[in-house]
Image (cartoon, rainbow, N blue to C red):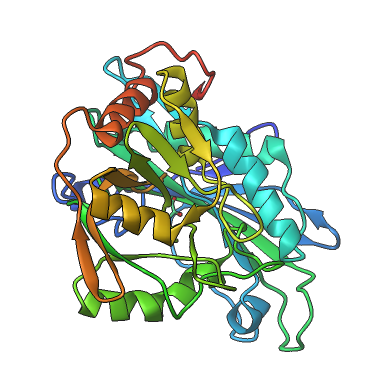
Amino acid sequence: METQSTTLNITKTSSSRINEVDFDNLAFGKHCSDHMMICDYKDGKWQTPQVLPYGPIPMEPSAKVFHYGQAVFEGMKAFKDDNDKIWLFRPEDNFNRINISAERLAMPAFPKEYFFEALETILKLDKDWIKKGRGNSLYIRPFVIGTENGVSASPSDEYRFIIICCPAKAYYSNPVKVTIAQKYSRSADGGVGFAKAAGNYAAQFYPTNLAKEKGYQQVIWTDANTHEYLEECGTMNVFFRVGDKLITAPTNDRILDGITRKCIIALAEDDGVTVEVRRVPVKEIVGAANNGELKEIFGAGTAATIVPFLGFDFNEKYYELPEVENSYGARFKQKLQDIQYNQAEDKFGWRHEV
Ligand code: COI
């Protein structure tokens, strides 16, 4: 059934796939909800967005995204509270960031009203895909691809902005072990490390596979020039608790400006914890592990939320982290989720009611 909203065309599905999904055993990102948004850019402007049933999108093999990787994306979440109200979490930040990423990959900015109207429309249509209860969410994946046909190496002059949604539980179901990068790099000065460019993720797969063969689920990337400073994990930003201080690397053109990262900094400072946003020498963290000052390392990201690290490998030596009472990771995850699930005052203005 075709309906018209102020700016979108909406076609609702005639048969939901929701009963095919086992919501108690979700593999992250494997199932998509019933609706998606597609909006094409051509003749120099974004066309009318379409909300339509989730399904395949036919494309020509010569489309630029397949050859030159012109693709950026976002990760955001919607939550359902105990009264069945749906909340987006910091969606303005995702909107701003996808346009920052797009600019770096020579792609056009997407209009804000289309983004929000599409999100709210999909979330209302697919509200049953958002389950109540801690740990449940609808993971929202907006992305943009270059769709012009033709394999010349130049920016596409046609694009497609798509939003799909996947019911999600934890991205990592267990604490993770990580290894510190000494050979490979995720990003370089002047590069695209700060952008959520698809290629940043592809580039990590090979070295991450090597790490996995040795029993480490993730790599903590270091600066490409010297490998002396800890940066981020690729799927998450990283926090180090040394004594009672929390330390994390500053964002720059190599490091993603993580939204969960910003939340942890704000929550920790609000809680009276000293947060140092500064370069983090590998030597300092290894030294702190050796003298017992290193209490915790945890990752922070939208998909991952907050994940404790069990330990890390450096130079073929494994450093196990202690079990701490009053873990910062656990405390700030609780505070973050209290806000996300509308169980605490939203003093920072992070929730957006749908
Ligand atoms: C996210 O946290 O939203 C991301 O995009 C990370 C991705 C590896 C799932």
- Residue 16's place in the image compared with 136, above or below, is below
- Identify which residue is drawn at 33% across, 29% down: 332
- Identify which residue is drawn at 41% across, 11% down: 345
* Residue 218: quadrant of the picture: bottom left
Q: Position of residue 162 (x, y in %)?
A: 57, 55
Residue farthest right in this picture: 44
- Identify which residue is drawn at 77% across, 65% down: 106
Pick the front one: 59 or 224: 224
Judge from the rendering whether residue 125 lies leftward or rightward of residue 241; answer left or right: right
Judge from the rendering whether residue 300 lies leftward or rightward of residue 170; answer left or right: right
Q: Position of residue 144 (x, y in %)?
A: 62, 60
Q: Position of residue 350 (x, y in %)?
A: 51, 24
Tally of numbered discs: 0
- Residue 295's place in the image compared with 314, above or below, is above
Of the four image quadrants, the one with ligand 1 is bottom left
Residue farthest bottom in this picture: 151
Q: Position of residue 294 (x, y in %)?
A: 29, 45
Judge from the rendering whether residue 22 lies leftward or rightward of residue 187; answer left or right: left
- Identify which residue is drawn at 72% across, 75% down: 148
Pick the front one: 181 or 351: 181
Residue farthest front in this picture: 291
Residue 60 seen in render:
yes
- Residue 28's place in the image compared with 76, above or below, is below
* Residue 63: quadrant of the picture: bottom right
Pick the front one: 337 or 51: 337
Pick the front one: 262 or 47: 262
Residue 235 seen in render:
no
